[in-house]
Image: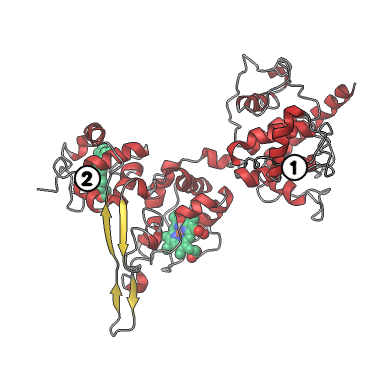
Amino acid sequence: MRRRSTLTVVVVTVALVMALGATAALGAASFSDVPATHPFCADITRLADLEIVGGFPDGTYKPDDPVTRQQFAKIIVLATGKHTEAVDNQNDPTFTDVTPALGIPYPFDYIEEAAKAGFILGDQGKFNPANNITRVQLALVIVRAGGSGLADPPAGYQTGFTDVPDYAQAEVAKAKFNGILDGKTATTFDPYANATRGQVAKMVSRLLDKIGEPAPQAYHDADGLAGGAAYSQWWTLDAAGSGTKPTTTVGADFYRCKACHGWDGLGTAGSYANRTGMSTGAANRPDVSAADLRAAAGSKSFEELYGLVRNVGGRGIDEAANAHPDFAAVLSEAQAWNLVKFMREEWIDPDLLYDLTIDGLPVYSDTTVEPPVVVKPTLTYSSIGVLGNETEGQALFASSCASCHGADGTTIALEGMSVGHFVRSKPNEAWFKVKFGIPGAMPVGLVTETSDMQNLYKALANPANFPDMP
Ligand code: HEC
Ligand code: HEC
């Protein structure tokens, strides 16, 4: 009886949630019934901003309403980034009571995705999608979704709860240990009670603290290889999705990412430690930044990284200054996302290709002497391609590079160097061009796998096969 009445409510609720979720503006969510003083305000807002939950057209969130199993399936799939456009299993549904007729994509596709990810198992072939989800079911699903992102409690860890069924003891303990959910009292977990939309938002928000926020759709849609190309010279990319070349009054290096951050993204701590900038004399070029973009890519959220790249209100685009420009003025949103994706997914860790020793401080102008002198550290590259396989690298060069560069890499002079010589003297730069291309000369994505790049480096490091220019 109860199930039936719930079902009616749910169908309406869900349609509304879907409708609003799709249009919610990033960073702007707020609900009339979730004031800033509401205990779950921060968590609800966070999930709404991430488009994991939505509100109702009347501007409410209804934090005290229960959550159904199908609604939670959608929430957990979105929270873990498991939702894809393709509709899974249309002709072979996992559960007998979840058919495409219930609705595509919601709830059908989300439930299939949750099942595929192993988050939900169902009960004797059924999922009971319209039932309210219970606290114990939440614990099971959340812990499965958390996977290795959640820490195992130490041996002998006790929750203190006396009412948790045996089959869920481990999951409830893990959820509690990781701070995702707690009991009603010190000894009761109240496993079969429902959870409210507010409580679920809090639990999922705590889960995201552990496993990281899911990528927004714009990130999924982004092209990391195009982002890598843009990192070098975004304005030379073709009209489709590329930036507008600013009217320049300063040298191009003032807005090439690589000029300030280096090919390795390590700035003054990496391969550009010896590069002279405007404050040390070469006024057509900015100083190399001390920012560590590799660290930022690994630690910032998607939105943070996007905001840092765009830097709304930053220094004027064609000013000769050392600060990060206002790229929001010239890069499209898609192009900024491409850069974010490049930073997170396509940058090859330099340690995987070569070793770099920097002897001395990053380049600086010594003003204690008159006239001031520019002091540079000495950079030494070694172990180039040491992790690769030479035979495979030779084969790759023969099939992908020799047509333009010749069998031994000496056909085209690259700043007077052969390909082998270039890789041996500028291993920080060579891989970047090989992976992301050179507009008008070399296509994007000739070699994308890091292992292939290692093989290529191993082969090209050997001057017996890939000599300097004759
Ligand atoms: C003229 C030099 C310059 C250029 C060009 C430049 N940056 Fe920056 N960038 C900086 C400096 C300096 C900082 C440190 C913060 C500041 O001064 O704004 C920085 C900071 C950043 C940060 C934040 C790092 C952190 O840990 O907070 C990111 C991300 C970033 N830059 C990415 C890029 C990308 C991508 C491009 C190319 C689209 C680019 N930068 C082009 C100078 C530059
Ligand atoms: C379609 C022809 C073509 C192919 C294929 C090609 N290259 Fe190139 N490559 C060029 C041209 C042309 C240049 C010179 C661009 C310039 O100097 O502006 C170049 C430049 C380079 C550079 C120097 C980049 C620089 O900044 O000067 C390296 C390194 C390089 N290629 C390596 C490779 C490797 C390795 C492969 C195979 C994976 C490869 N190339 C495949 C045409 C090609």
Between the residue at mark 1 and the residue at mark 2, the CA separation in whole angstroms equals: 55 Å
Picture disc at residue 192: none
* Above or below for 134 versus 211: above
**Among the two numbered marks 1 and 2 on one chain, the one whose residue lies closer to the N terminus:** 1
In the image: residue 403, left or right of residue 150: left
Give the camera-side residue of 162 and 316.
Answer: 162
Q: Residue at x 85, y 25 (%)?
A: 8
The residue under the point 22% across, 35% down is: 394
Q: Residue 247: where, in percent of width, then height?
A: 41, 60
Residue 115, relative to residue 457: is it above or below?
above
**Which label sits on residue 461?**
2
Residue most toward the front? 156
Task: Name, please, the residue furthest toward the left.
Answer: 470
Q: Secondary structure at mark 2?
A: loop
Residue 246 shown left or right of residue 396 in the figure: right
Q: Residues within 10 Å of mark 1 (few under 14, many from 20)?
A: many
List x then y, in percent, for residue 37.
Answer: 82, 55
Residue farthest along the right direction in this orientation: 1
Residue at x-position 45% and y-position 58%: 292
Asked whether the viewer can see residue 439, the reply is no
Question: Alpha-carbon neighbours of circle 2 within 10 Å: few (<14), some, or many (≥20)?
Answer: many
Is residue 78 shown above or below 376?
above
Closer to us: 205 or 48: 205
Identify the residue position indicated by label 1 in the image: 181
List x then y, in percent, for residue 168.
73, 30
- State which quadrant residue 342 falls in: top left
Whole-percent x and y of residue 69? 75, 28
Which residue type does callout 2 highlight?
A: Ala
Direction from residue 157 to residue 437 in the image, left or right: left
Q: Amino acid at mark 1?
A: Leu
- Give the structural element (helix, strand or loop) at label 1: loop
Ligand 2 under 8 Å from disc 2 Cβ? no
